[in-house]
Amino acid sequence: MEIVERVSRLFGKQKPLETTRAALDWCARIAISTEDALAKLNVDAVNPADIYPDVFNDAKRAEEHCPIKMGGAGNLTLLYSLTEGLEAARGIETGVAYGWSSLATLLSLQKRQGQLFSVDLPYFKLRSDNWVGCVVPSDLRGNWQIYRCADREGLPRATRAAGSIDFAHYDSDKSVPGRLWGYDHLWKALRSGGLLISDDISDNDGFQRFCEQIGIAPIVVVDQGKYQGILRKP
């Protein structure tokens, strides 16, 4: 499904897979702000762009010079703050694109000589390999391992390399089967107290179904009209 999603996006026909109004209604009904979500987790809200303005200015210039259009930055305050709050040393993410989420988490991880393991399937026929993660500066790349393949191949490799992880950030295959497989794989790798964060959870009921499957109520965050889900492993 991940390859099909990328091909459809290439030809401008991509729509969220298996979208249901019920999923959007579920998110809207329980969503809270980024600040309220972080407060609920006893984590201070910090925008990494305020702490590292020069790094982010350089990153913006790197994105502007990229000849390929990829995904946006996402909720970087949420990701950076959670990585800090966990005092994380190891994390896994799926979906890199320009590398904004990678940048936010690596800026926190590098304080503890931590490592980020990323899985990213290059955009079909767009020759994006050389541009994936282009906003991440060279001095952070020593803490970063990218597996350039689909989730079904890359996630097992990443979890074997990482071992137990403090957090997982899911932003790749948005189909329900893809989500359920990816969430389950990442959930098993999380340590007790670790966090699973997923983007775009209103696309379909995959995230809701996984929450029901494991019997844990999520925190749902709304930011700029998009929804992220957070699950803490007992």
Image: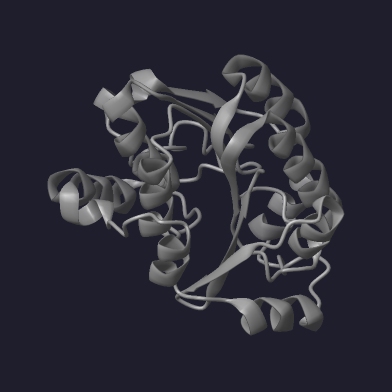
Where 130 falls versus 216 (above or below)?
A: above
Compared across the picture, whether 81 is left or right of 19 comes to left
Q: Quadrant of residue 176?
A: bottom right
Q: Position of residue 226 (x, y in %)?
A: 54, 72
Compared across the picture, whether 13 is left or right of 214 comes to left
**At x 72% / y 79%, what residue is drawn?**
26
**At x 19% / y 43%, what residue is drawn?**
55
Q: Is residue 94 visible?
A: no
Colouring used for the render? one colour
Q: Is residue 66 visible?
A: yes
Q: Quadrant of residue 155?
A: top right
Compared across the picture, whether 97 is left or right of 212 comes to left
- The foreground one among 42 and 184 is 42
**At x 35% / y 42%, what residue is drawn?**
84
Q: Position of residue 56 (x, y in %)?
A: 22, 49
- The foreground one among 72 and 33 is 33
Q: Which image quarter is the C terminus in?
A: top right
Compared across the picture, whether 216 is left or right of 82 comes to right
